[in-house]
Amino acid sequence: MTSVRPDLKTKIWPEPYTGSPDTDHFDRLPDSVLLLVFNKIGDVKALGRCCVVSRRFHALVPQVENVVVRVDCVIPDDDVSSSSAASDKTRGTFSNLVSFLLVGIYKPLQALRQFLGPKRSNSSSSLAVGGGCGGAEEYEGMDQSGDVTHHSPTQVLKNFNEIRFLRIELPTGELGIEDGVLLKWRADFGSTLDNCVILGASSVINPPGTGKFSVLQESGAYNGDGLCGADDNGSIPESFYTNGGLKLRVVWTISSLIAASARHYLLQPIIAEHKTLDSLILTDADGQGVLCMNRDQLEELRVKPLSASSASKRTLVPALNMRLWYAPHLELPNGLVLKGATLVAIKPSEQSAVKKDIADGSWVSTSFEEPYGTAMKMLVKRRTYCLEMNSF
């Protein structure tokens, strides 16, 4: 029996193309492939520019399921009529909060309410994006006169019909904090707050050789946390209650909850208009805070309208049960050191399983990426302190 062996010297040549030389091969790609590319692009400004390439692109872009909106700035409504004034504020987002935060327990809250809530005057603030899915000038953030124009995320997204995964990114976090201080939060919302996790540290020391800025306070200096070198038996030192450490954590907690509830309030029109949403994330470029909503939570908000705070434009925060873990000095396996490390896990008091869910810490330690996930796993093994907070 003979075997057939391939002739390795034989070359395979492509069949000659017999079509017209004027044929655009890109037009031969099916719509499904183009939509796959557009979904990988995601960025709403880039998609807006794709719209002006051809009529086919203009018809396909509104079918994109994965969209990312990066907010350029926050523009007071009384300045919208002046495009030049709005342009000057592009890089000044939230800067008015920096000087207010961490100087007491009341001023931070007043600053946040002033910024996030309705002004006593006729002015207010709105998010602005320089681009969208409309005319060509809108994609470039320019009007016909050449001046910079801005649009709210709701306006930018109005022509997208099938969004399933939406990510909105603010230019900075709302909470102005000093260099070297760590403050991160993550909140899940339905029609109201479902849970919130806050991780903070009064100073961060990076591993040797990283070349990064590290310690805010010198060794042995006052930092509102007691002596980091003291014997650590898992309990909070007495000095924590008397030298401002507890007050600082209260400021972090309330300020983070106000920021989260204000973000949630802003999402109402987007959620109402885009009923195909499966996931919505509102974060910021600093990585300070993340608000998340899944499909069930989005549907809950549509069925059960949120309760707004009477004092400002934000969602009312319900009565809360909280668990707090604290370590004066927490060294992570990668060499990162957190001084005054604090973890707060929050759930509404009305949830029947709140004690079990918070006590086991299973959902808490997965809220942030590494190395902070490891820090949270280490903190939840320490002594737990229970707190309660009224609705506000």
Image: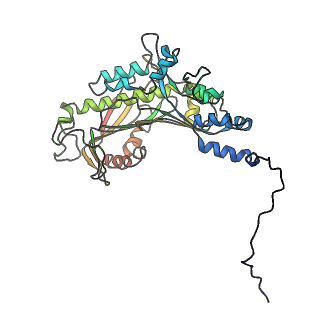
Q: Which quarter of the figure has residue 269? A: top right
Q: Which quarter of the figure has residue 11? A: bottom right
In the drawing, does residue 16 fall left or right of residue 281?
right
The vertical placement of 132 against 144, above or below, is: below
User: In the rendering, at what x and y percent does residue 221 appear?
Assistant: 16, 38
Q: What sort of colour scheme is used for the picture?
A: rainbow
Q: Nearer the viewer, residue 244 or 115?
A: 115
What is the total number of numbered labels drawn onto the structure image? 0
Q: Which quarter of the figure has residue 34? A: top right
In the drawing, does residue 313 fall left or right of residue 238?
right
Q: Residue furthest front?
A: 21
Q: Nearer the viewer, residue 371 or 226?
A: 371
In which quadrant will I find the C terminus?
A: top left
**Residue found 46% across the figure and 13% down from its top:** 123
The vertical placement of 310 against 61, above or below, is: above
User: In the rendering, at what x and y percent does residue 250 appear?
Assistant: 30, 30
In the drawing, does residue 19 fall left or right of residue 204?
right
**Residue found 75% across the figure and 45% down from its top:** 27
In the drawing, does residue 90 fall left or right of residue 48?
left
User: In the rendering, at what x and y percent does residue 68 appear?
Assistant: 55, 37
User: In the rendering, at what x and y percent does residue 142 appear?
Assistant: 58, 25
**Residue found 33% across the figure and 46% down from its top:** 380
Q: Nearer the viewer, residue 177 or 57?
A: 57
**Do we see residue 134 in this rendering?**
no
In which quadrant will I find the N terminus?
A: bottom right
